[in-house]
């Protein structure tokens, strides 16, 4: 995780990449697919509902606004149970 603060807007930014499962409980999950997820998470926290103008350019990199549960996606990746 990398964290930043935008000095112009005060927005708190976080980038999570190389998201993976570090270990599993083999009594509960028999699979052990520990490869990283293909997704990364770019999180923005700020008081305003609209993003700073410079952040709108992130869509050029394939970013999109979406709800994303790292835990659920890791679980699905390890078990093969996609929802």
Image: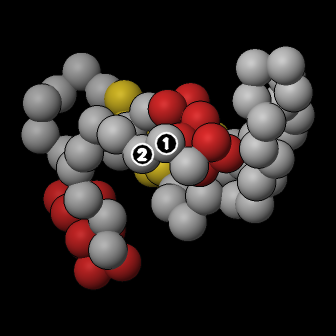
Q: Residue at x 24, y 21 (%)?
A: 47
Where in the figure is residue 50, as x and y percent of width and height? 12, 40
Locate the N terminus by quadrant: top right
Where in the figure is residue 4, as x and y percent of width and height? 58, 43
Q: Residue at x 85, y 39 (%)?
A: 22
Is residue 22 shown above or below 20?
Answer: above
Q: Residue at x 31, y 27 (%)?
A: 46
Give the residue at mark 1.
81
Give the SS element for disc 1: loop
Question: Mark 2–mark 1 contact, CB under 8 Å?
Answer: yes
Q: Tell me the quarter of the picture where residue 68 sits.
A: top left
Q: State whether residue 18 appears in this view.
A: no
Return the mark for residue 82: 2
Q: Tell me the quarter of the picture where residue 17 sits.
A: bottom right
Return the mark for residue 48: none
How packed is label 1: few (under 14 Cα within 10 Å), some, or many (20 or more)? few
How packed is label 2: few (under 14 Cα within 10 Å), some, or many (20 or more)? few
Residue in the foreground of this view, choosing between 58 and 38? 38
Residues under labels 2 and 1: Cα distance? Answer: 4 Å
């Amino acid at each position: 995780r990398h964290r930043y603060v935008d000095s112009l807007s005060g927005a708190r930014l976080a980038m999570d990449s190389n998201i993976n499962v570090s270990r599993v409980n083999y009594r509960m999950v028999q699979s052990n697919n520990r490869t990283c997820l293909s997704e990364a998470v770019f999180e923005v926290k700020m008081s305003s509902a609209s993003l700073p103008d410079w952040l709108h350019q992130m869509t050029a990199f394939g970013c999109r606004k979406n709800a994303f549960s790292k835990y659920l996606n890791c679980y699905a990746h390890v078990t093969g149970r996609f929802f």
